[in-house]
Image: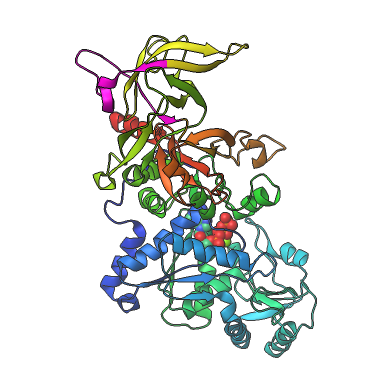
Amino acid sequence: MEDQKTPAAPAQGKDFIRTIIDEDQSTGKHAGKVATRFPPEPNGYLHIGHAKSICLNFGVAQEYGGTCNLRFDDTNPLKEDVEYVDSIQADVHWLGFEWAAMYYASDYFERLYSFGETLIRTGKAFVCDLSADDVRAFRGTLTEPGRNSPFRDRSVDESLELFRKMRAGGFEDGSRTLRAKIDMSSPNINLRDPALFRIRKATHHRTGDDWCIYPMYDYAHALSDWIEGITHSLCTLEFEDHRPLYDWCLEALGLENRPRQIEFARLNLTYTILSKRKLLHLVTGGHVRGWDDPRMPTIAGLRRRGFTPEAIRDFCNRIGLAKRDSLVDVALLEHCLREDLNRRAPRFMGVLDPLRVVLTNLPEGVVEELDAVNNPEDPSQGTRKVPFTRVLLIERDDFREVPPPRYHRLSPGQEVRLRWGYLVRCQEVVKDASGTVTEIRCTYDPATRGGDAPEGRKVKGTIHWVSADHARAAEVRLYDRLFVAPEPDVAPEGSDFLSNLNPASLVVSNAARVERAAADAPPGAFFQFERLGYFTVDPDSGPERPVFNRSVSLRDSWAKIEKKTSARR
Ligand code: ATP
Ligand code: MG
């Protein structure tokens, strides 16, 4: 896998897919129409990789005044479920896209079946009685050609009768298949008489027990695309070797106005697993709390974590499209969220690990209302009042009894600025019997309201704080990467991706105290707690106990990477 640490520049010029569409438009192919589809299998929740495909398919349709369908590729009843169907619709909508029409491959089962009969009648398909093991043995290898099935030359009538009997439930699972008659010596194994239908006596989430034969992916996919009038069928690179079969299905049936399959590289992200099968394993194995656990790369997880559709779409634009697989740095995804929230998120103050500060020269009972700017990046968000009182809480980490060099926060005798407030100086440190600091006593300088230092007084540090009497208790969930390895699939002999799980991917703080307005925000609201990061209100929140997820910290490792690489250029 190629390591792509620098992102593709935001769409300068056109990518290869849009170039192809431009050409088709100029030659009048498809009568100038652009029709795409996003075809998920409802066997799991969508993840950030799917977002790339969604942004591409819906984006292309929008740009060319065309249409994009949502199509559920529901041809494998054993693994599919309506829970997934529902979540997929919700996620596509949430990402900001509207489908022209929604279909299911199962809508086409009857037509796909009759296409099967047509192929038999024209001598292009046959019913094969080989078992799965025999089929494999006859298939050959990459270096050896396969051998024809002994059933390949059975008569059209016999195949037709058997195919009908397969449909009617007359045979056991795995005992027969309908196979295309292509070429057992083709260097492309996908063309060695691939199966088109298999027997599977399973209840389907939509068609119930109507069917006991199900079409295979390549066949169903090509024909569903054609039925819907898709012009450009965009899929990931692993289907490149399937394209000849996709084309064969359309040609063998003599269909006009064929869609064109075009492959692009799938998204791979550092520190992230993007395989539905493995994500399901994380859920069923209890390694995360569910598909929407904020550490999951699913759309539902990212949403709960506090990602915005804007940030995800921006990310998908920036990574661009390539014909070769690459590994994108997850720091770029985080960077896109930071950029979006920096512009839009209101700021509040909150303290994760509180330390009491008593202002000895501010009388008890006095409440001063200070003006705080809601979002320095967006004046239209206005200001709010923040109560300033005798007892405040600051971050324990913002005080050191013995400050290290260049420590600009609070320490004995030193002065610091309280955000939106006054300059305060530490006069006394109170400890308990074990030597733990329990309180610090400070004086504030009434002449410094708003935080302006008088001429000649240098105060470098500014720290956040809340009023002890006004702040509300909250639970804060701090997330880290779910995996410790940049490529979680690379695991030592004898173990798998689970061995790369990060044991500290979630740290919960129950001691936090936050500004009241933040505590009253509804689930899904987002804001910055100054100096701590961007947060969102978790659905677990209640009026008694707000719960915040840290979406992303303020430290931007991507900005650093970008700076370094642009300096090198
Ligand atoms: P997984 O391998 O995670 O199970 P999938 O490819 O089986 O994913 P589908 O439901 O078949 O999932 O995918 C729907 C569409 O999304 C397909 O066109 C597929 O190519 C695309 N897609 C899936 N994963 C990615 C990815 N990581 N990057 C880009 N596109 C993806
Ligand atoms: Mg798939």
Q: Is residue 263 visible?
A: no
Q: Which residue is drawn at 59% across and 52% down?
A: 275
Which residue is situated farthest in the bottom direction here? 157
Instruction: Tell me what residue is drawn at x 73 percent, y 73 percent.
Output: 202
Please tell me which residue lies in front, 234 or 504: 504
Nearer to the camera, 239 or 128: 239
Image color mode:
rainbow
Quarter-wise, where is residue 456 in the image? top left
Residue appearing at x 26%, y 14% in the figure: 458
Measuring from the top left, give residue 569's x and y in whole percent. Answer: 28, 32
* Rendered location of residue 205, percent (x, y): 66, 73
Name above or below for residue 488 compared with residue 82: above
Segment tinted magenta in the rendering: 442-467
Is residue 152 placed above or below 45 in the rendered structure? Answer: below
Q: Can residue 21 be seen in this view?
A: yes
The picture places residue 511, in percent across and down from the top left corner, at 56, 32
Q: In this view, does 418 lie above or below 503?
A: above
Q: Quadrant for ligand 2?
A: bottom right
Q: On the picture, is 248 further left or further right than 465?
A: right
> What is the x, y in percent for residue 248?
52, 74
Q: Which residue is drawn at 53% across and 80% down?
A: 252
Q: How many labels does the image show?
A: 0
Which of the two residues, 370 or 196, is positioned nearer the viewer here?
370
Magenta residue check for 302: no
